[in-house]
Image: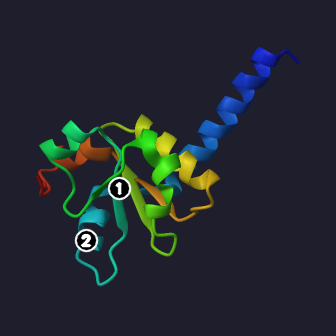
Amino acid sequence: MSNEFSYVVWGCVLLLAAYGGLSNRLSAEDLRVQLTAATPPLVIDVRSDLEYRYGHVPGAHHLPFWSVLWRWPEVSEGRAVVLYCEHGPRAVMARLLLLLRGVVRVQLLQGHMHHWRAARYPLET
């Protein structure tokens, strides 16, 4: 097997692990309800600083996807974690990095910020 092919295969395996199937998705409605719970999940916005300032899920922490490797201790391993970006790719990469660091209770917001905004759920600026 050539090296190039091996990289493609491993890349596909890592992407599948990061996506983790539909069971690792949390609907916007479920997140909205969970945010009012006694122990809400840790919500992390992995978009750029400008996107975050423009509007984010209320209470979401800003952790750009490229900084997850350096700032991962900020993620509370005892709480459920919900990641989102605008459409999905950055959150998937951040989830993969957290999974590689041993943070296993990581979900992706289904539809990400695009869906949250389209549903007219509250935004924090």
In the rendered image, the residue lying farthest to the bottom is 38
Q: Residue at x 79, y 24 (%)?
A: 6
Q: Residue at x 61, y 56 (%)?
A: 101
Q: Callout 2: helix, strand or loop? A: helix
The residue carrying mark 2 is 33
Residue 76 at x, y = what percent? Answer: 46, 69
Q: Amino acid at mark 2?
A: Val
Q: CA distance from mark 1 to mark 2?
A: 16 Å
Q: Is residue 21 visible?
A: no
The residue carrying mark 1 is 44
Q: Residue at x 57, y 45 (%)?
A: 18
Q: Image quadrant of residue 1?
A: top right
Residue 8 lies left or right of residue 74; in this view the side is right
Q: Which mark is residue 67?
A: none
Q: Amino acid at mark 1?
A: Ile
Q: Nearer the viewer's eye, disc 1 or disc 2?
A: 1
Q: Residues within 10 Å of mark 2 (few under 14, many from 20)?
A: few
Colour mode?
A: rainbow
| Viewer-nearest residue: 2 or 50 | 50
Residue 63 lies left or right of residue 2; in this view the side is left
In this view, 93 is above or below 22: above
Q: Callout 1: helix, strand or loop? A: strand
| Viewer-nearest residue: 35 or 102 | 102
Residue 33 at x, y = what percent? Answer: 25, 71
In this view, 34 is above or below 99: below
